[in-house]
Amino acid sequence: MKRVFLIDDDEVFVFLTKKVIERSGVDVELTVFSNGQEAMEHIKGIAGDESKLPDVILLDLNMPVMDGWDFLSTYQEVEVAKSIALYIVTSSISPYEVERAKHIKEVKEFIVKPIAKEKFIEIIAH
Amino acid sequence: MMTGVPIVQDEAKRLAALRELEILDTAPEEEFDNILSLACQISDTPMGVIGLLDENRFWYKAKQQFPVSHDSSIEMFNSLDADLDHPIVVSDTSLDSRFMDHPFVTGEPYLRFAMFVPLTDENSLLLGYLIVTDSTPKDLSEVQIQGLKMLGKQVMSLFRLRKELLKSKRLENESRIDLMDRKQVARELDKQKSFYENILNKIPTDIVVFDPNHRYLFVNPFAIRNETLRKYIIGKDDFEYARYRNRDESIAKKRRAQFLEAKTQGKEIRWEDSLVSPGGQIITHLRRLFPVYDDEGNLTQVIGFGIDITERKQLEEKQSVLVKQLSAQNTQLLDFCNIVSHNLRGPLINMSMLVDFIEETNDLDEIKLLVSKLNPVIESLNTTFNELVESIQVRQNLEIESEDIVLKDSLKRALDGLEMEIDKSKAEVIIDLDEAPVVNFPPKYLSSIFHNLISNALKYRSPDRQLIIHIKATRTDNSVLLMVKDNGLGLDLEKHKDNVFKIGKVFHKHPNAKGLGLYMTKAQIDAMGGKIWLESAPDRGATFYIVFANQTPKE
């Protein structure tokens, strides 16, 4: 079973992502954080514990308190005991943000919302 | 062209006239070199030639910085089918089919600009061209073109003089010196001298010539208009001139420094000079100084030119203002793209996904659940959209009417509209508007500003203490300062100072925080020529200051 962290403040999108998971039929344990800070505090607490770290992180950019970019710059300094596939999932189509993401090696891919069922299955399969 | 003489040349007659000059393959002569040098100076080009159209070559009598002695590809000249009275100006050879394949264009010296002044004799026979050229494209002013035309005529009078000299030499050889001819030669020489002076005196450019010690040898009327002063200055320097005219020596000192720079560098220097005319207009000159050396390399003269470039300068300034405006508009456009991306695209995606799910299911309960999720999405979309439309209107509506508004009334309406939230949060509002009870401002904007700032304070209140909002108006000379202060969460200005008033920026965890309110507030205040700024620190509350401009006190 894959463990997925979803970091997004948009409650409707979180609801929809749960539906997508339901319908894609993959076996996933989803944990939701409504901003970067909540997620970061949690990850710092389990950074050394491979059994609790996620396989996949889906990260929104425009969030209150700590946005996606701030999350990433802190995340780069945390030593996690596992290789985690991190995806930016955003409604932004700004080329500037796409370019900025390219320079962060921790980011596996820049995905523009929505995530289709097929794309989600592909992410989980890796 | 009706006035011109078309090139229909009798080649045999043309060549005969050329041969008569006995000039082909002779050594360089100072007179021609000087004319060419002057031509290059007038046109501000580094290269040039005075060339003669021989049977199958274009031979250079004078050349400046030109790498070869002649040009054997004379076909190009056949394509110069303009009339003989008008020079041909080629601003960019690489765009002109007559020149783009010429070896001097495709190879060394890579010519891009060329101007051809036809050299025609009294029988309209085309003997050659005075050519100035450059390796960068350019345009010449009418004044420059006229100057070059005059120099072209001067080359022709040198040719005539040459013929006369040859003729008189032959007569001398035959020991039959004809006094009349000698007088004619002297007359021709006088004519030539006055011709030069004519050019230098009439060309609308400042021209001065200095000796190696920076004393004036020549000044043309455009450099000094007053004839007495112009005569006085010859043999003097700028310091003597300043004393004579009771002026301080600052300009003389500056000029001396520039002169010495040209002298030490041994090459041309140029700079721009701005001064205010008696009419209050700023006049800009491009000034150039270049040293002239003799054959032994000794400095003989320094020549100075000044050209009025005020018009060009004004154009440049207009362009730079335009660029600034455009880039400001571009930033605004980017802001709008941001909001479309973040605040409209997000809800739209949610909507379309919800609709997809609804279409895929037949389960009534599931459909009900999905539809219930649609409502908040549509509501947020609607709010964002309305705010966006409104903010565009603020940016566009420059003619909105201001009125005298009693601040207390407008504030009360805003507080009434937020009554529920105020009650819920048990906020205390302190109002102190006695010093400036009235402002002149668009009523709609003022209510919107109050609403946004108070909702802002309510949204970002601290859970640890009772919210107190303090609203105070004070008066300065010609403006009213409004302060809206809270004791809420505050924010880190170090981190957010550039973004506070931008679209789509949120700094707090709040479901409705879309960052549009402050953008709107700033847009409304900007539109009326006012100012807004924020003082804040994390957990120390936030204070907004607004300046309402142009508030003349009422008696």
Image (spheres, helix red, strand yellow):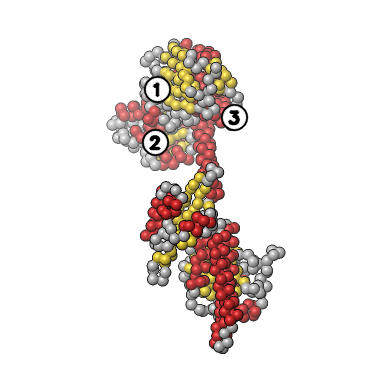
Q: Is residue A74 left or right of residue B375?
A: left
Name the mark on residue B397: 3
> Which residue is the site of mark 2?
A86
Observer-nearest of B101 and B85: B85
Observer-nearest of B484 and B171: B171
Name the mark on residue B490: 1
Tell me if mark 1 has few (under 14), some (14-19) or many (20+) residues whose alpha carbon lies within 10 angstroms of its own.
many
Residue at left offset 41%, top offset 57%? B259
Amino acid type shown at disc 3:
Asn
In which quadrant will I find the C terminus of chain B?
A: top right
Judge whether B485 appears above or below B168 on screen.
above
In which quadrant will I find the N terminus of chain B?
A: bottom right
Amino acid type shown at disc 1:
Gly
* Position in image of residue A8 (x %, y %): 43, 28
Tell me if mark 2 has few (under 14), some (14-19) or many (20+) residues whose alpha carbon lies within 10 angstroms of its own.
many
Q: Is residue B305 left or right of residue B191?
A: left
* Position in image of residue B541 (x %, y %): 39, 20
Q: Sequence-wise, which precedes: disc 3 or disc 1?
A: 3
Observer-nearest of B453 and B214: B214
Which secondary structure lies at badge 1?
Answer: loop
Residues under labels 3 and 2: Cα distance?
45 Å
